[in-house]
Image (tube, rainbow, N blue to C red):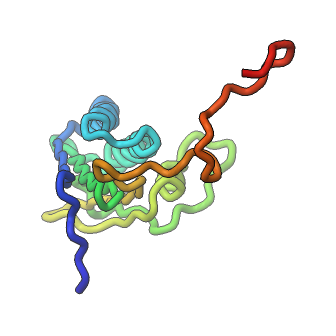
Amino acid sequence: MNQATPHVGTSVGTFTQLLSSTRRGARLARLLAVTELRSRGASQDLTDRAALVVAELAANAVLHGRVPGRCFRLTLTFDPAAGRLSIEVSDARGDLRPLSRPTDTDPLGTTGRGLTLVTALADHWDCVPYPPSGKTIRAVLSCPRAKSPGTPQPPLSGGSEAPLRAPATPGLPPQ
């Protein structure tokens, strides 16, 4: 088995939080995910995609996985060296498992698009049992790999080392 060696100076960060199975808990999950990813230096693109995935999975946990008195769990595992973010949302209803492929929804309906969005934003997602009676929805998002310090940046335009110039403005002399 071939295992990658982590880069020196990069670390895998894990964040886990139990949240109330309420709309407020789902909203807080999204806000906490954004805050955590920003604090770890994740790109804006990854943070935006993760915010949408967490929002959809947390909303599903609250709407379809809620058991009175039980919380749902959000877990983020960010590995910048591998260019990967894993999002897990666990709830208490293992008997209500999502379809592996979202079905077509009513184009005029206001619900039923959550897992379609997750499918579009994530590299892949799956559902696994969460003992003793729940389930975990896992979604994996790829992101640009972190650059090691001292790594030369590629040229911005076709290999030319010419300085960047502002585009010409009509009526003004070129720079």
Image position, residue 122 (x, y; %): 45, 57
Q: Residue drawn 28% across and 48% down?
A: 149
Compare residues 126 and 86 and report the one nearer the observer.
86
| Residue furthest to the bottom | 1
**Is any atom of residue 52 visible in this view?**
yes
Identify the image quadrant of residue 138: bottom left
Q: Position of residue 101 (x, y in %)?
A: 51, 67
Q: Is residue 89 visible?
A: no
Q: Is residue 174 above or below residue 137?
A: above
- From the viewer's perspective, is 121 left or right of 67? right
* Foreground of the two, 9 or 50: 9
For the image, the number of numbered tags is 0
- Between 88 and 70, the residue placed more toward the observer is 88
Most extreme residue toward the top is 171
Quadrant (top left/top right/bottom left/bottom right) for the C terminus: top right
Task: Determine the residue located farthest toward the front in the rendered image.
Answer: 162
Residue drawn at x 19%, y 50% is 13
Q: Residue at x 25, y 40 (%)?
A: 40
What is the residue that sits farthest to the left in this orientation? Answer: 132
Q: Is residue 117 above or below residue 5?
A: above
Position of residue 114 measured from the top left corner of the image (x, y, whole percent)? 49, 49
Quarter placement of the N terminus: bottom left
* Location of residue 104 (image quadrant): bottom right
Question: Residue shown at 18%/50% (left/top)?
Answer: 14
Q: Is residue 101 above or below residue 67?
A: below
Image coordinates of residue 90 in percent, x first then y, are 25, 54
